[in-house]
Image (spheres, grey):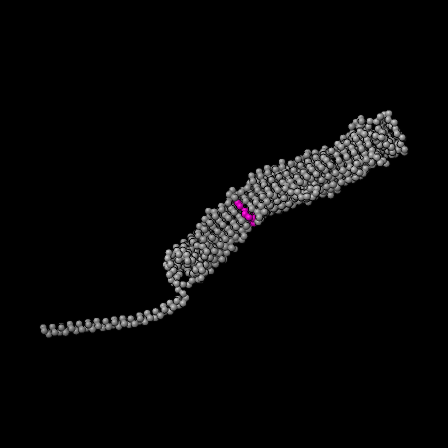
Amino acid sequence: MGVSKAAANESCFGIGWIEDDVDDDLQPIGAIQACRSRAEESRVGRYRSICLMRVMCVRAYEFKEFIVLCINILPQSCGSVGLELKVGVGYALPIKIGTGVYFGGDDTRTKPPPTTRQQPNVNQTYTIDKPLDVSGNATVGPTSSVKMNCVGRKCYQLDLFNILGVVDVVASTVLQITQQLVLATSGTLNINSDCQIDAANSLVQGDFQVSAQTTFNNTLTVSNNGTMQVNNKTLSVKTVNMDRGNINILKDAQLTIDNEIELKNNSIISNSNGIIISNIINNLSGSLLINSGIFKSKTLNCKSPFEQIIKGGSNVHLNNLYIDQLSYLTIQDSTLNDETTNDDEEPLELGILNLINGHLNLLNSKSNLNYQKIDLSESTKFNFIKSNIQLNSKSFNLFNQSKILLNNNTQITISGQFGCFDDSSIIGQDSHLTFDDGSTRLDGSTHQMKNTILKVLENAQLSIGGTTEIGELSQLFNHGKNLIIDDSGQLSISNSDFINTNSFTLNGQLNMNDRQSQFINSPTGTVQILSNIISTDGVFKNNGNWINSHTTNHINNFDNSDGGRLELKNSYFYLNELNCFGGHIILDQSKINSTKDIVLQAGSSLQGKGTIETTTFDQRNSTIGSNHSISQLEFTGDLIQSNDSTTIILVTDKNNSNVKVNGNFSVDGELIIYVDNKRLRNGAGSEHGSFEIEIITSNSVISGDYRNGIKIIEYEGQVVDDPCKYKVQKKERSFAMLVNLDQSCSSSSQEASKALFKDTKTKIGLLVGVFGSIAIISVICTVIIMKRHQINTFLKIKQQSLRHSRVL
């Protein structure tokens, strides 16, 4: 090594010794020579041995109670090449050492071994081939290297093993250490063959390299910047404590911790393409870095403010996850699952995910979490970015201003009981949120969805007690049992779509004030409106059942089409525009007020009891009234009917449907009157009776007529064309039906009546002719007689006058 002879000799004299209470007067056995002087040397066979005071050094021999330890110097100058220690070479019996052994180049009798790593001044290699039993301490000096080459379960039995230099385990073995294994800061322990370490506890402050199957059966402490690196193999430990320590798990390697691992004082666990399996991980103030690895734990308790990142396609299985005290756990490009397994590969269930003032970030990751309980509290943030998440929990709650953040095409499905309380919130951006199979309650603060799809599936129920904002090209799909906006809740839809396919109940407030917004109730959906709707813009489209029971609602545009059923109960439906294209409107003591004209068309219908307040109600290819219930409809404006429209009137026990028009009424199409003749007869008060029923009234002159005819149908389903029984009469401002219950004409008597009526008219004509002629003749005769009488009277007067003149 290029050192002086004096330095070499000094090194040689401190190479190895056995501290024992050896009697100076002890006689050697056979060819054994007792060394008593520090500088004495002796030869045994062809080997040269170096001995120290109170040290015995032999080759090929054994004392009754202690040793066999031999130093071979090859070649003659120990300083030029190095030293080799062979213990127990060629022996069948174990080597027994009384009070301790030191392997090294420093005499610790005069100074303690160095505590920091240093470059050895000579290359000193010690090889242990046979079992070694040391009752005291076994120490490897900082400039020494020990090869442990003994094979078997009882190779090394030590009280305390201190490693300041290098120890290489090169054969499968067991280290039985009564007290402690200490790997000092200057030491290195290389496990190159399967090894089991049975120590009360082990302390790693140096460099620990694991390249073979290694097992610690008790507690392992990594501290003072000590490093454990596991390469390609498995390291199994009962319990691990880390205090400013480092554990690195490299490719295809595995760290298995049976009980618990605790990280303190900026300790670091790094897993790169390896596997970590633990029962409990308590990260109090350390860092957890996993890259392209597998991480399984029954419980992960994060309280550290330092970096905790799982990325690179890692696979994480956590049964219980606790994050609190401003701790951050980031899972990126990886998979987070709840289900882990123990050593027997049995599934573990009944987990808890608990975040208290902590942050869980999932970035481009996948998760399938089946926790019995998930709690987020104390301003916790649950952040998902471009991730796919399945959360299954019997209880999932947000408290105290906690937030779930969904970003960048995140897809999350929540099953089970879910609730947001105490100013907590869900914020979604460019994502997809689904509630499936459970009950969800959104109280708390403001829940915002931007360009996000929110789905409530068939077996789920969603209740909103806080404020939920659906905006910026978002979509809300309700397929659930019931989506409820509670009394204190508010749902705001802006530039988005709400699609309901099951049940939606509004007890709070619904706002939709954007032109691009739509509320769509599909054919299978039912909407119950029990409170106020405010919509200055946007469109409501109803293709299912829409039941409105609130006093007033302010809606911009309502499209009731394609079989949609709009039912108003004791409510005032105020809107800007109402379109009904193949839809149905049922009024129950309600009013519709529309700023624009209402068009009823394409097979639509209007029935019930109520008022339509609009300038013009345009009825095209549609029906007013019903044959199943009384309809009493009042139109405050004009009513215009087309040729293909139908008006249905139901008459029963003198209570009948009617249509009242306050404006102009243009009649057309067909009038059908259904008569419940049995109830009508009972309502008349006797078996026979006749009366008039007013069915249509108008404040102005009625124009037009029912060009497709008037049809009267009794409840038995027969069309009645009996002028003796029912007759509809059009008046100037109304239509009335004349009912004569004591008249009935069959079809044959009707023909006879018509024939009789025809004969009667002929006879009456003849009689009128005869009596007319007689009357004329009588008049002529009377005139003649009167004229004759007048002539006779004139002649008489003339004759008397002539006589009188003659007398004179």
Q: Position of residue 649 (x, y in %)?
A: 43, 57
Classify residue 225 as left or right of residue 597: right
Q: Position of residue 109 (x, y in %)?
A: 80, 27
Classify residue 5 as left or right of residue 530: right
- Regarding residue 7, the answer to whether it shows in the image is no
Give me the residue at 59% from left, 42% from top.
395
Which of 24/515 is in front?
A: 24
The range drawn in magenta is 475-485
- Regarding residue 350, the answer to whether it shows in the image is yes
Q: Magenta stretch: dominant SS?
A: strand
Q: Position of residue 692 (x, y in %)?
A: 37, 58
Q: In the image as oriented, which residue stretches furthest toward the top?
A: 25
Give me the residue at 45% from left, 57% from top.
627
Give me the residue at 32% from left, 71% from top.
766
Which of 425/93 is in front?
A: 93
Give me the residue at 41% from left, 60% from top.
704
